Amino acid sequence: MEHDYNEREHMTLGDWIITFLILCVPCVNIVMIFVWAFSSDTNPSKKTFFQAVLIVWATFFCISLMISMIGATSGIIHQMTHHSAIFLPRL
């Protein structure tokens, strides 16, 4: 079902306030972000905004994952090099 958004291209201030109030509800907010980002019935400006939100989330998730992997790897290497000297036989 295709909607004609020519009559109402832009979201009103009230539409945005309702949108942000829905985003204040835990768990519902995450579900609604995906619904608004991928639904064909969503206002185009709202859909584009939430697609951008998901892209930013994915970017930050990947960056934080890489940073945590680097930190974990450096911690493991530090543990192996720092504490392995204890178990070496003394000459």
Image (cartoon, rainbow, N blue to C red):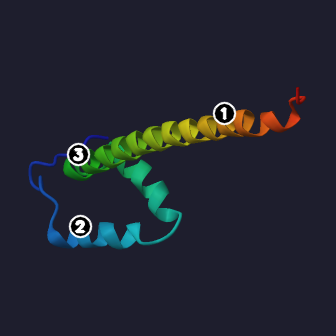
Residue under the image location 47 percent in, 71 percent down:
25
Comparing marks 1 and 3, which lies closer to the viewer? 1
Closest to the observer, 64 or 47: 64
Disc on the earlier residue, 2 or 1: 2
At which x and y percent is residue 43? 24, 51
Residue under the image location 84 percent in, 38 percent down:
86
Closest to the observer, 60 or 14: 60
Disc 3 is placed on an element classified as: loop
At which x and y percent is residue 65? 52, 40
Give the residue pinned by disc 1: 77
How far is the residue under mark 3 from the one under mark 2? 19 Å
Residue 3 — which label? 3
How far is the residue under mark 2 from the one under mark 1? 49 Å
Tell me: residue 77, above or below residue 34.
Answer: above
Disc on the earlier residue, 1 or 3: 3
- Residue 20 appears anywhere in the view: yes
The amino acid type of the residue labelled 1 equals: Ile
Determine the image quadrant of residue 13: bottom left
Q: Residue furthest front?
A: 91
Q: Is residue 27 left or right of residue 29?
A: right
Q: Are marks 1 and 3 in contact (CB under 8 Å)?
A: no
Residue under the image location 49 percent in, 64 percent down:
28
Q: Is residue 76 left or right of residue 69?
A: right
- Residue 39 appears anywhere in the view: no
Dot 1: within a 10 Å radius of its alpha carbon, few (fewer than 14), some, or many (20 or more) residues?
few
Closest to the observer, 78 or 17: 78
Residue 16 — which label? 2
Q: Residue furthest left?
A: 7
The amino acid type of the residue labelled 2 equals: Trp
Disc 2 is placed on an element classified as: helix
